[in-house]
Image: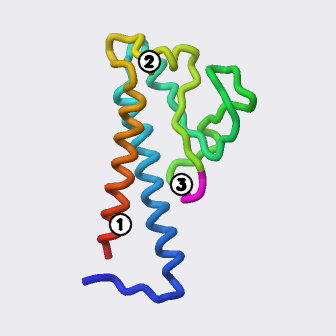
Amino acid sequence: MARRIRLDQIGEYSEDKLNQLMRVVVFETDAELKARSPVDTGRFRASWAIGENFVGNYDAGTSTSTAPVSLNYALGNEKIGKVYNVHNSLPYAEPLANGSSKQANAGWVDVVARQMTNRARQLADQIGKQD
């Protein structure tokens, strides 16, 4: 049976559901990037971080602003309308993403991005069918 929501609760209900979607997608994106990361010493895998509402340009330490770190992000507090990025600011992150390791093909980060886009759509469809 479908859950009944009063008209004055629609906004809050919708926002809560979208925040849940954001939490899952951010968490799963971080986990998937770590799982697919090529590993030698483990430093690269351990250096993934989530940033929230970062605006600027950064490339392996040459940012125009402070590179986002997990300090400006609290797991479980994701909100719709904020921007999240999962990044790795090690100098060799871009070469690894472009296939410099035999452990990961070029474009593996893009594969994760497409996978997570599809996952977000799948979750949104499920939310629409709940309650």
In this view, 89 is above or below 71: above
In this view, 122 is above or below 61: below
Q: Which residue is mark 2?
A: 98
**Residue type, numbered disc 1:** Ile
**Residue type, numbered disc 3:** Glu
Q: Is residue 80 magenta?
A: yes
Q: Position of residue 29 (x, y in %)?
A: 42, 40
Which residue is rendered at x = 39% and y = 46% of the image? 117
Q: Which residue is mark 3?
A: 78
Q: Which residues are magenta?
A: 77-82
Q: Quadrant of residue 51?
A: top right
* Label 3 packing within 10 angstroms: few (<14), some (14-19), many (20+): many
Query: Does label 3 or label 1 sit earlier along the sequence?
Result: 3
What is the number of the mark on residue 127? 1
Name the secondary structure under disc 2.
Answer: loop
Is the stretch drawn in magenta largely helix, strand or loop?
loop
Query: Label 1 vs label 2: CA separation?
Result: 35 Å
